[in-house]
Amino acid sequence: MNWIRYEVTTTHEMSEIVAASLLDLGIEGVQIEDDYSLRLELEANEKSWDYADENLLSAEKGTAKVIFYVAADTDEIVNKQIKEKFSGLEISYAEETDSWWEEWKKYYKPFRSGKKVIVRPVWEDASDIAKQGDIIFSIDPGHVFGSGLHESTAMCIEFLESTINGGESVLDIGCGSGILSVVALLLGAENAVGTDIDTACVDAAVKHAELTNVGQKFSAYCSAQQNLPAYDNEYDVVTANIIADVIISLAPLASRV
């Protein structure tokens, strides 16, 4: 499908008014790029500073961009109304296709994580980089965390390679895509349990365990509570590839299990 991507350049104060004006035209989905508003959010919540680009802290109070899309086959009257409504502002537009949704797959190739783990997108063949003794984690990546590309994921995989000798039970708190649980099973763990607060993560983890033929050894649960029945058991290995302050809060739970 073809789309027209509009970009209206305005000010921090006017960005919400522009977005509201678009509602009058029946356009509900907009994206506002405004570094200054993010800086205000950071100033109001200093605990978020660790997760923000340092450039945001020095952002000037200046321009903001309101971005939205309309279908290319939309009535020309609508496109004319958009251009007239914002004629006093800088506005740019260009036609795009939605092939970008699949375009990224061209650049996501099989890669090695740790010493002997190969992460393979399901649409790629890993035979050209796999060596004898390697294990292959097949992934159908979506929006959940755990593509294997992040440094902390690679570090956790290296930890598992040095820890799993065969027969262990594993708990992965915040399992994301399930990569650590599945890799642990491929390395020889007897069973693995994944937990996450996002149902999409739980679904993805189960799917990846099945893709890699270890589904019968894997269970996943969705809950933000620390009273899951899964937490009544004891495990040989606990992984938690999450941000530091969450790991700190989960440390007593990890110790308990």
Image (cartoon, rainbow, N blue to C red):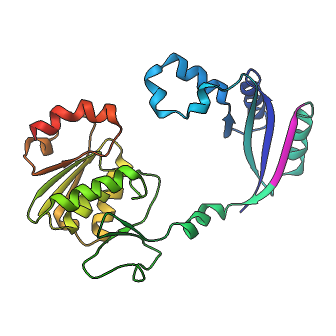
Nearer to us in this view, 19 or 107: 107
- In this rendering, position of residue 23 left or right of residue 141: right
Task: Name the chief secondary structure element in magenta.
Answer: strand
Residue 210, picture quadrant: bottom left
Nearer to us in this view, 207 or 92: 92
Q: Is residue 201 magenta?
A: no
Tell me: residue 106, above or below residue 48. Answer: below
- In this rendering, position of residue 237 left or right of residue 95: left
Please give the range of residues in magenta.
89-94
Residue 224, picture quadrant: top left
Tell me: residue 213, above or below residue 31. Answer: below
Residue 121, picture quadrant: bottom left
Identify the residue at image location x=31%, y=63%: 114
Q: Which residue lies furthest to the top in this view?
A: 44
The image quadrant where one finds the N terminus is bottom right
Where's residue 227, x and y in %?
16, 35
Identify the residue at image location x=87%, y=36%: 90
The image quadrant where one finds the C terminus is top left
Identify the residue at image location x=36%, y=38%: 243
Tell me: residue 201, above or below residue 216. Answer: above
